[in-house]
């Protein structure tokens, strides 16, 4: 009971400190990702300062390009909104005629005006304003990542001095970092394949802004289970407004095919036992970390749960919990 009470108190504290924990945890995982190219450059003889500058400038350039692309695309989408409204009214008129033919009568004004252009404009304006706020938050995260990378190489020596015999702690830390790196590397490759495939498919169908929907599919694919479905909603809505029900069905079939093949066939084969979490635990972790840390918690739900599982494995008293959290294949290998 005491342990359960401590867990509840810790979780409640994390939820209350969400505004502080989110940038910190995001910085930790970015530092883990960026440490690989940084240490690789150092091994090649590049000085630490130059390697750090190269990694940071590259990451910032990619981020600024993505933000500029999303901002310009949303502006174009806002300009094209009147034509989309006209297309939607035509589709609704066809739908009303079809419903009347099968005996369902709907008032003429019931379905028209579904898209409120003023609200859409406010939404897009809010997103563009949010991109500016994102740059401010990104600066804080960037500074924390830089300091973490500068301290990364000295952590093993500090642990040995602080703990005396720190080999077990260093081994456990290395295991956690390696697992996170492997998961993020594989997830990035599969998400990239998903985003590129979605963009190509939507371009073939003729949906506007396929690169934007491909980027959205790439980013939301990091959210397990539901991310791919969320990414499909705006693209399919635009397909219906722009091209009609037939193109929408064709585009939806492409989403199902691509996510089914990559998410259920390719990714599990490549990932193997790298995650070692059961499907139920992955879903519950998505809900739990999403409640504790918001959208960033959903993105980091699997890596955070992997860290907890590895930490539980290191203690004989809690190893049974780690086994219950693991997949069936992982349990059979114990």
Image: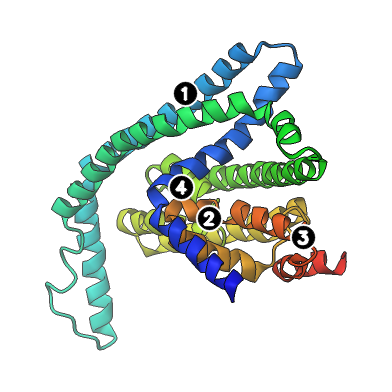
Asked if the residue under mark 4 is in contact with the one under mark 2, i.e. CB atoms within 8 Å, the reply is no
**Mark 3 vs mark 4, CA separation in Å:** 26 Å
- When asked about the image quadrant of residue 92, the answer is bottom left
N-terminal of the pair, mark 2 or mark 1, is 1
N-terminal of the pair, mark 3 or mark 4, is 4
* Residue beneath the point at 57% across and 22% down: 55
- The reply to whether residue 247 is visible in this rendering is no
Q: Nearer the viewer, residue 201 or 50?
A: 50
**Mark 4 vs mark 1, CA separation in Å:** 25 Å
Q: Which mark is residue 223?
A: 2
Q: Nearer the viewer, mark 3 or mark 4?
A: 3
Question: Badge 3 local density, few (<14 within 10 Å), some, or many (20+)?
Answer: few
Q: Which mark is residue 189?
A: none
* Residue beneath the point at 27% across and 72% down: 95
**Mark 2 vs mark 4, CA separation in Å:** 19 Å
Q: Which mark is residue 315?
A: 3
Q: Nearer the viewer, residue 17 or 86?
A: 17
- The reply to whether residue 108 is visible in this rendering is yes
N-terminal of the pair, mark 3 or mark 1, is 1
**Mark 3 vs mark 2, CA separation in Å:** 29 Å
Q: Nearer the viewer, mark 3 or mark 1?
A: 3
Q: Secondary structure at mark 2?
A: loop
Question: Badge 4 local density, few (<14 within 10 Å), some, or many (20+)?
Answer: some
Depicted 74 relative to depicted 101: above or below: above
Q: Which mark is residue 61?
A: 1
Question: Badge 1 local density, few (<14 within 10 Å), some, or many (20+)?
Answer: few
**Residue assigned mark 4:** 21
Q: Is residue 2 left or right of residue 135?
A: right
Depicted 161 relative to depicted 216: above or below: above
Q: How many marks?
A: 4
N-terminal of the pair, mark 4 or mark 1, is 4
Q: Is residue 242 left or right of residue 49?
A: left
């Amino acid at each position: 009971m005491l342990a359960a009470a401590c867990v509840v108190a810790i979780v409640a504290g994390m939820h209350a400190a969400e505004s502080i924990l989110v940038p910190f945890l995001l910085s930790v995982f970015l530092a883990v990702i960026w440490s690989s190219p940084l240490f690789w450059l150092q091994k090649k003889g590049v000085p630490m300062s130059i390697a750090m500058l190269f990694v940071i400038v590259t990451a910032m350039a990619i981020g600024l390009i993505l933000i500029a692309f999303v901002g310009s695309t949303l502006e174009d989408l806002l300009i094209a909104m009147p034509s989309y409204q006209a297309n939607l009214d035509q589709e609704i008129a066809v739908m009303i005629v079809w419903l009347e033919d099968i005996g369902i009568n709907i008032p003429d004004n019931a379905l028209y005006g579904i898209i409120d252009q003023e609200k859409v404009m406010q939404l897009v304006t809010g997103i563009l304003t949010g991109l500016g706020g994102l740059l401010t938050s990104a600066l804080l995260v960037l500074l924390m990542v830089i300091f973490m990378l500068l301290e990364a190489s000295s952590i093993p020596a500090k642990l040995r001095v602080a703990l005396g015999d720190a080999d077990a702690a260093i081994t456990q830390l290395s295991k956690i970092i390696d697992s996170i790196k492997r998961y993020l590397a594989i997830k990035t490759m599969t998400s990239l394949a998903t985003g590129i495939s979605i963009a190509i498919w939507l371009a073939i169908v003729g949906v506007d802004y396929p690169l934007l929907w491909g980027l959205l599919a790439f980013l939301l694919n990091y959210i397990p289970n539901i991310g791919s479905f969320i990414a499909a909603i705006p693209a399919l809505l635009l397909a219906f407004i722009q091209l009609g029900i037939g193109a929408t069905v064709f585009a939806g079939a492409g989403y199902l095919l691509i996510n089914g093949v990559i998410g259920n066939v390719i990714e599990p084969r490549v990932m193997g036992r790298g995650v070692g979490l059961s499907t139920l635990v992955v879903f519950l972790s998505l809900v739990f970390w999403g409640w504790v840390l918001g959208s960033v918690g959903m993105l980091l739900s699997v890596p955070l749960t992997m860290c907890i599982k590895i930490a539980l494995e290191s203690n004989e008293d809690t190893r049974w919990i780690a086994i219950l959290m693991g997949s069936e294949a992982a349990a059979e290998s114990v």
